[in-house]
Image (cartoon, grey):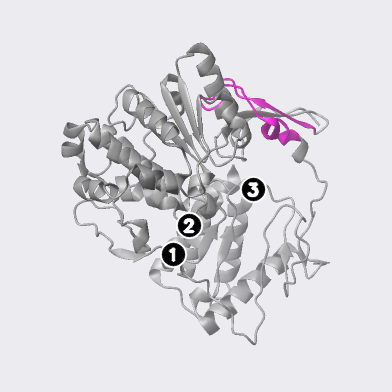
Amino acid sequence: MTAQQPTKTTCPYCGVGCGIVAEVAASGKVTVRGDTNHPANFGRLCSKGSALGETVDLDGRLLYPEVGGRRTTWDAALDLVASRFSKTISEYGPDAVALYVSGQLLTEDYYVANKLMKGFIGSANIDTNSRLCMASSVAGHKRAFGSDTVPGCYEDLEIADLIVLVGSNLAWCHPVLYQRIVAAKEKRPHMKIVVIDPRRTATVDIADLHLPIKPDGDVALLVGLLKYLLETNSIDRDFVATHTSGYAEALSAAEVLDGPTIAERTGLSHAMVQCFFDLFVQTEKTVTVFSQGVNQSSCGSDKVNAIINCHLATGRIGSLELRRFPSPVNRMRWAGGKSAASQTCLRRTWTSGSLRTASVCSASGNRPQWPRAPASRQSICFVLSPTAASRRFGLLRQIRWSRCPMRAMSRWLFAIARSWLSLMSARTPTPYAMRMFDCLRQHGARRAVR
């Protein structure tokens, strides 16, 4: 066996997107190092990324398909999945089946999985664990910009004069970005860092100001900041008039908050709040970074929009050098809100041109329900995974794959679709479904060659 050429790829863990270089020795051992030319990490890796090579082995992996705990062939396993899906759909409709996929899939694999579920099967029942992490942020950005587009880049963190970290423990959760900020602060000691977090995390070690806010007090603090920007004449009125809409409604919602109310809802002293407000007002180059402390909340989208509103008010959107965000829509939307006492929140969807604006809905929102099997029947779950970590969950039946690297998932989804199509004699696919299957077939063929 001869050694292979190094392969450049991406770390699959926290989402920073660190570039790595993997090398396979003649013995089969895999070593991993940071890619010094990658713009996300420039060679840096955290402890998890550095240990990636240790995860590439056969320990704990199944080496063949199993059905009900017994070894079987690939054809039998794939045909079983296809036949059970077909039978369930013929009896209960396409919404009776669902795919729950991983947040660690590659973009191409997400594409194939969505084409299979939405285009071929005809159901929207596909979800991932990514929703818990990012759905609130996506909704907030769509409200504000009409697109899930984050107007910033990593380089902004190194040239900012003020970084506001909201619900983000970068030191533990995104160590490489934390290291970049630490290095930037050492080079530019005048850089200020504010951490807004109920806990004193490891990230607070580099903070100039820590605001130990009450859980879910973020909206009150940031709406209070918006009001303070108005009171101190810190609004970029030209930017607001030219590039935004909904300004008056947002300020109307902010007017209900006074100093004592902010202190009560945030649990912060007046001196702490005033120090933060003054830093934000006085610092032109400001970047706000938020993470799961904002997203994973029943009011996460409102927190996101409260943050964005403060940047819209001051025109601090996009690159710190340009200060202007080249929005994909004509006008960016302000997110307003009712008072907390009303127990409701105003949820505005993205508005541009003919796009609709939502009305008032309950704070809990209307959550879609997963389809349920009849009470007299048991649900069946098929597990497509390279590991044997989840052996039994009281499921009627499982199929587990092994030697299935994450990049090969699309091939197995394509194989299921192909096997399924051969069993569709009782149900003629629509022309649209056939076009989607053609996309799957072409995509799967490309993936198989790689």
Is the C-beta separation of discs 1 and 2 under 8 Å? yes
| Residue displayed at 19% across by 47% down | 248
Identify the element where label 3 is drawn.
Answer: helix
Q: Amino acid at mark 3?
A: Met
Nearest the eye: 212 or 166: 212
Instruction: Give left or right: position of 417 versus 396.
Output: left
Q: Which residue is mark 1?
A: 364
> How many numbered discs, if any?
3
State the image coordinates of residue 231 (x, y, percent, origin top left): 24, 35
Question: Given contact means CB atoms under 8 Å apart, are the residues at marks 2 and 3 in contact?
Answer: no
Q: Name above or below for residue 128 compared with residue 57.
A: below
- Quadrant of residue 338 in the image? bottom left
Q: Earlier in the sequence, mark 2 or mark 3?
A: 2
Instruction: Return the residue at label 2.
Output: 298
Question: Splitting the image into 4 quarters, where does residue 151 fall?
Answer: top left
Residue 366 point in image, percent of width and height: 42, 68
Q: CA distance from mark 3 to mark 1?
A: 35 Å
Residues packed near mark 3 inside 10 Å, few (<14), some (14 to 19) or many (20 plus): some
Q: Which residues are magenta?
A: 29-53
Cα distance between the residues tagged 1 and 2: 7 Å
Q: Residues within 10 Å of mark 2 (few under 14, many from 20)?
A: some
- Secondary structure category for the residue under label 2: loop
Residue at position x 31%, y 54% in the image: 337
The type of residue carrying mark 1 is Ser
Residue 239 in the image: state x and y as whole percent: 20, 33
Residue 189 visible (yes or no) = yes
Residue depicted at 69% across the width and 35% down the height: 48
Q: Nearer the viewer, mark 3 or mark 1?
A: 1
Mark 1 or mark 2: whose residue is earlier in sequence:
2
- Taking the magenta stretch, the answer to whether it contains residue 142 is no
Q: CA distance from mark 2 to mark 3?
A: 32 Å
Residue drawn at 47 percent across, 29 percent down:
194
